[in-house]
Image: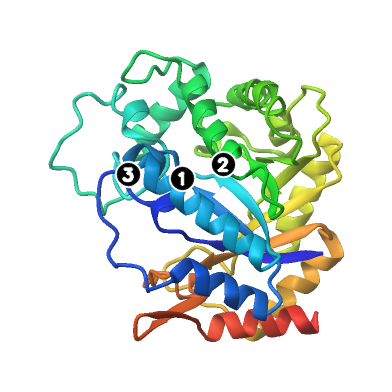
Amino acid sequence: MRIGLNFDGIKVSDYQNRSKPLQPPQEYVQDSFNIFMSHGIDMVRIPVYWESYEKDPAGFIEELNLISNEADKNNISCIYDNHQWECSSLLGYGIGFPNSIVSPIFQDISLNRDPYKHPSKKEVENFWNHWWDRTIKSTDGEDGWTKQFEFIQKVIQTVDNKKSTAAFELLNEPQVFRHGDFKKVSKYHDNLLSKVIDITDKPLIFCYSYAGRLLALNFPWIQAKIKPLLPVKNTIIFDIHPYPPYFIAILYFRLVSKLMKIDTVLAGEYNSGTGKGVKISSSQHARYLRTFRKFLPFGVMFWQWSYIKDNDHPAFNLAKNVDGVIAPNDNFESFVKAIKNS
């Protein structure tokens, strides 16, 4: 089983509508990958954000090259993940879709909006309903799905030829608010695959869809409808995010994968929970990895390594800043110990 972590970059994960709270340590990328190599971490998942690319295309591509070069040097495999969380920083405390895609839907959005508050559920639902209906046009009048492929194409073209590049993820945690939209997610996946397979032969990953409302009825047989149906030569991997990886959660995702008839399942993110103040102990690290080895032998990625401390979720911190230099913290040491002993 491949065991790795999620890596929070700088330019590839920058907010379009607010600034990050801290400057990164010196040689952050280089030192991080050296630490991974020296501790036996040989796979990382790199969340990259469309809005970050729109904010600074040159800086984004420069950092992608830096990350992939460091991964090559240290024999570390990388999964490049088209990431979104809470839709977009234009709506509040989220990141993902760029202003050119989100702003046409919310033309009356307040310039005085608090960027550190979560977006309203109504606004997020409004966005995703339009996204699955494929009615979103960018500010230059082009189809949203097509514009997203153009971003993914830039990522693939930059790193596809690197020996460290292991796979590409189509979209992190798409949200569904209407029961019938699970089938539309499948069509969306097929639309992307039909284009992506022409530019890479690397494995392609699609993520489970988060049900934003109870009415979405996210039963295993409903979730299974998001599976891409287009026959492709690329290996197709199903990505799950158990927070935490309790036995019942793993059983749910195993049933979904069986219904999809997909054997390769990746836990692209996991941790001990998402509640405020959540922590993780050495025994939890060990227990989670034992569960994964039993039920998901392909690979798991812990969330996350970042130079920005998450004060609300201490379990999410694997790194610390020591006099301007990135270094592992106690959570990381426990994680590595659990890997060696599992």
Q: CA distance from mark 3 to mark 1?
A: 20 Å
Please give the label number shown on residue 61: 1
Q: Is residue 57 left or right of residue 222?
A: left
The N terminus sits in image quarter: bottom right
Q: Mark 3: few, some, or many residues within 10 Å (few <14, many ≥20)?
A: many
Amino acid under label 3? Ser
Say if residue 88 shows up in the picture: no
Residue that appears at 59% across and 36% down: 157
Vertical arrangement, residue 116 with respect to residue 273, above or below:
above
**Precedes in sequence: disc 2 or disc 3:** 3
Residue that appears at 69% across and 30% down: 226
Vertical arrangement, residue 330 with respect to residue 105, above or below:
below
Residue that appears at 45% across and 16% down: 143
Mark 3 sits on what residue? 89
Examine the image and state in which quarter residue 250 appears.
bottom right
Q: Position of residue 340 (x, y in %)?
A: 77, 82
In this view, the residue in front, 143 or 72, is 72
In this view, the residue in front, 295 or 297, is 297
Q: Are marks 1 and 2 in contact (CB under 8 Å)?
A: yes
Mark 2 sits on what residue? 158
Give the total of numbered labels.
3
The C terminus sits in image quarter: bottom right
